[in-house]
């Protein structure tokens, strides 16, 4: 019995990946940690001088809690992403939030319109259904993505067929 042929994935005609802005680098984290520890040490010295030594351990726990929450937020934001891809049969929006929850929407690219709403932002619309995209992008970046998507969808709907055999006959 011959093996079944593996399903070939559809070729991707266009793909846009957006992620949240993460400007907090390790150097910035160490700077924040140093400032927070310096603040806690300075406050600890003041409380020790006033004779309120039981407050000092709580300053340390507070700083550990703040830095721990910053690290957790930074790691969670690394998981978030949005992918808009166009294949031969559909335009697909896949979104993963910071908690790992997934959203997936598929639209027919022939009938999909790119819309901009003041309140909703950038949307893909098809027959009354709207899918918001570009949540991690600024308004300028959303406008650029909208223009790119309009052009990609226009080229998808109006393909150019070039047959060299037909060129010479006309």
Image (spheres, grey):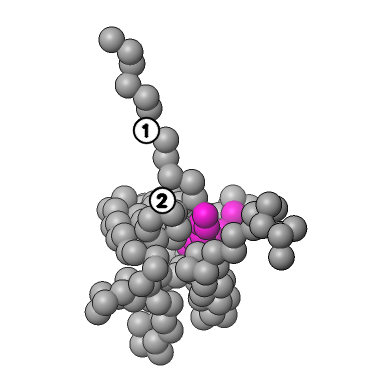
Residue drawn at (38%, 27%) of the image: 6
Under circle 1, the secondary element is: loop
Residues in magenta, as a range: 13-25
> Residue 84's spot in the image, x, y percent?
44, 60
Q: Do we see residue 86 in this rendering?
A: yes
Q: Tell me: 26 left or right of 164.
A: left
Which quadrant of the rendered structure holds the N terminus? Answer: top left
| Spot occupied by residue 144 in the image (x, y as percentages of width and height) | 57, 75
Nearest the viewer among 54 and 106 is 106
CA gap between label 2 and label 1 equals 28 Å
Residue hosting label 1:
7
| Image-based side of 11 in relation to 52, left or right | right
Query: Is 152 placed left or right of 66 in the picture?
Result: right
Numbered badge on residue 79: 2
Residue 147, percent across and down? Answer: 55, 77
Q: Residue at x 37, y 33 (%)?
A: 7
């Amino acid at each position: 019995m011959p093996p079944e042929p593996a399903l070939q994935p559809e070729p991707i005609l266009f793909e846009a990946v957006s992620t949240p802005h993460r400007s907090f680098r390790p150097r910035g984290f160490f700077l924040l940690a140093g400032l927070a520890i310096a603040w806690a040490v300075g406050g600890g010295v003041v409380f020790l001088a006033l004779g309120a030594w039981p407050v000092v351990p709580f300053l340390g726990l507070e700083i550990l809690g703040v830095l721990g929450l910053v690290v957790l937020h930074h790691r969670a934001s690394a998981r978030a992403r949005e992918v808009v891809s166009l294949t031969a049969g559909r335009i697909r929006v896949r979104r993963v939030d910071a908690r790992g929850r997934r959203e997936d929407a598929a639209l027919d690219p022939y009938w999909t319109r790119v819309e901009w709403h003041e309140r909703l932002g950038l949307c893909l619309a098809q027959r009354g259904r709207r899918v918001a995209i570009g949540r991690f992008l600024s308004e300028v970046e959303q406008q650029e993505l909208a223009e790119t998507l309009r052009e990609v969808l226009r080229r998808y709907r109006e393909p150019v067929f070039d047959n060299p055999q037909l060129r010479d006959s006309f």
